[in-house]
Image (spheres, grey):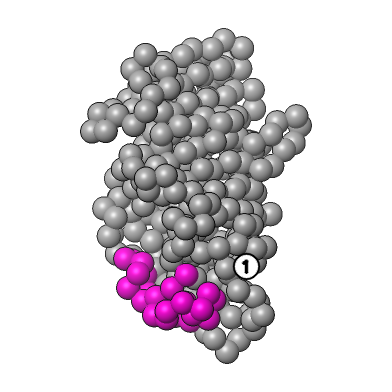
Amino acid sequence: MKRNLVLFLALSFVIGFASCKKDASSTSSNDQLATQSEDQAQVTAEVDAVANDANVAVEASSIFTGRFTGAQGTICDATVTVNAQSDPRTITITYDGTNCTGNRTRTGTVVISMAANTQWKNAGASITVTYQNLKITRTRDNKSITLNGSVTHTNVSGGLLINLATLGSITHAITSGGLTITFDNGSQRSWQVAKQRVFSYDGGVVITTTGTHSENGLSGIAEWGTNRFGTAFTTAIQEPLVVRQSCDFRVTAGQVKHTVGATSATATFGLNAAGEPTACPGTGTYYLKVVWTGANGNSITVIRPY
């Protein structure tokens, strides 16, 4: 979705900035931060994209929600099949490698399972989303990641997105104790995910994302684990990330901090050219402010458009 592409491109600036600001004592940390920021931005975008696909597939299935059947064709690069006889019941999304978004291709399978006595519209209902060799390849550089493992989606508030304008808000939680990621250099790591997405309606859909994990005195962590170099990392949403349909599904506010070792890069979104919060600029440009802090404790701040 456009939301994922915009956030990925914005965070990519953090990558470039962090990788350029080096000194003799922190080159390794900066290189890891740059690579980790890029890896995390891509993984986050793709986990969110699968979550969006799961929402489409589940809400289009009468087996899961009581609405109309026939989800085929609702996901541009995949076919969808439903197994109503098993327990748990399943929806299988098979990605076919079509480049329908213009920026990447996906192959592999995602299986959504839900207990037969559960209805997704009910508060507390959960589904398990299992990634089976889901390979995502970026068209701009042909680099890929492959995802395996299970993620739990919980409909915390209850309700269906099709009724969002009437309901006012719907809250989903996305958690995983070990999503396995294979990078294009062959390294494989297990990442944890803990975040919440609140869907609301204000002149269009509004998606507000926060991290829900805390450790070592840091809260708002959305992803954590070890990066491709085997170094511990955290990605914390310090201020909720807000995406608004009324602003062309752009990231209109929020702050994200990537930390690898003693090095960090913090990006604040939804600003004007002076670095101050602003309303949707229409056809104009948003800006983000990046504060890079090196292993020596020095920091540098820059403001750039996204």
Three-letter residue code for mark 1: Asn
Image quadrant where residue 131 sits: bottom right
Residue 230 visible here: no
Q: Residue at x 45, y 32 (%)?
A: 253
Q: Residue at x 48, y 12 (%)?
A: 300
Residue lying furthest front: 166
148 w.r.t. 1: above or below: below
Closer to the camera in the image, 160 or 210: 160
Which x, y percent locates residue 133? Answer: 50, 65
Is residue 68 inside the magenta stretch? Answer: yes
Point out the image quarter for the C terminus.
top left
Which x, y percent locates residue 112? Answer: 55, 71
Which x, y percent locates residue 64? Answer: 54, 76
Residue lying furthest top: 298
Q: Which residue is mark 1?
A: 122
Q: Residue at x 50, y 37 (%)?
A: 241
Closer to the camera in the image, 99 or 261: 99
Residue 10 visible here: yes
| Highlighted range, magenta | 59-82
139 w.r.t. 90: above or below: above
Closer to the camera in the image, 215 or 189: 215
